[in-house]
Image (tube, rainbow, N blue to C red):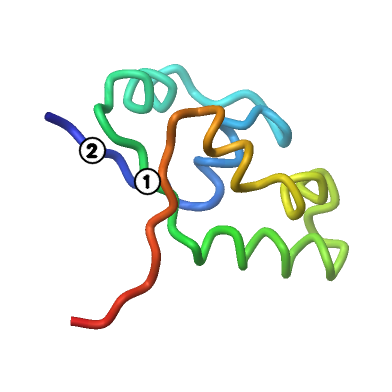
Amino acid sequence: MASYLPDTHVWAWDLKIDRQPPARIVALIDDADDVFVSVISFYEIAQEARLGKWSSMAPVVAEGPSALKRQNGKILDLTSP
C-alpha cells in the first residue's frame, strides 16, 4: 500500500492547469493507493492567486477540494501530536 503527498506545485501540475506534469510524477500519483494534499497547499494557492503571482490557479481557490475529490485524493489537515 503506497501513499503519496505531493507538494503544492506537483499537485498543480497534476491538475494540468499550470502545465503538464512530468511522466514520472503522473505514474507516482496513478500508482498510489492514497493521494493526500496538505491543507497548506490550498492556503499557498489562495495566497499566490490573491497576490496575482499564480493567476492560472485562481479557479482552484474556490474549487480546490472538489478538484481533489475528483482525483480521489484526500485533504491532509494540520494536527498537533
Residue at the (72%, 33%) spot, across then down = 17
Residue at the (74%, 54%) spot, across then down = 61
Residue at the (76%, 52%) spot, across then down = 62
Which quarter of the figure has residue 23?
Answer: top left
Q: Amino acid at mark 1?
A: Phe
Left of 2 or right of it: where is 59?
Answer: right
Dot 1: element: strand
Q: Residues within 10 Å of mark 1 (few under 14, many from 20)?
A: many
Q: Are marks 2 and 1 in contact (CB under 8 Å)?
A: yes
Q: Quadrant of the N terminus?
A: top left
Q: Earlier in the sequence, mark 2 or mark 1?
A: 2
Q: Looking at the image, which residue sits at the far bottom?
A: 80
User: x, y (%) of residue 64?
Assistant: 65, 47
Vertical placement of residue 72 versus 38, above or below: above
Left of 23 or right of it: where is 21?
Answer: right
Left of 53 or right of it: where is 80?
Answer: left
Residue to which mark 2 is pinned: 3
User: x, y (%) of residue 81?
Assistant: 18, 81
Which quarter of the figure has residue 16?
Answer: top right
Q: Amino acid at mark 2?
A: Ser
Residue to which mark 1 is pinned: 36
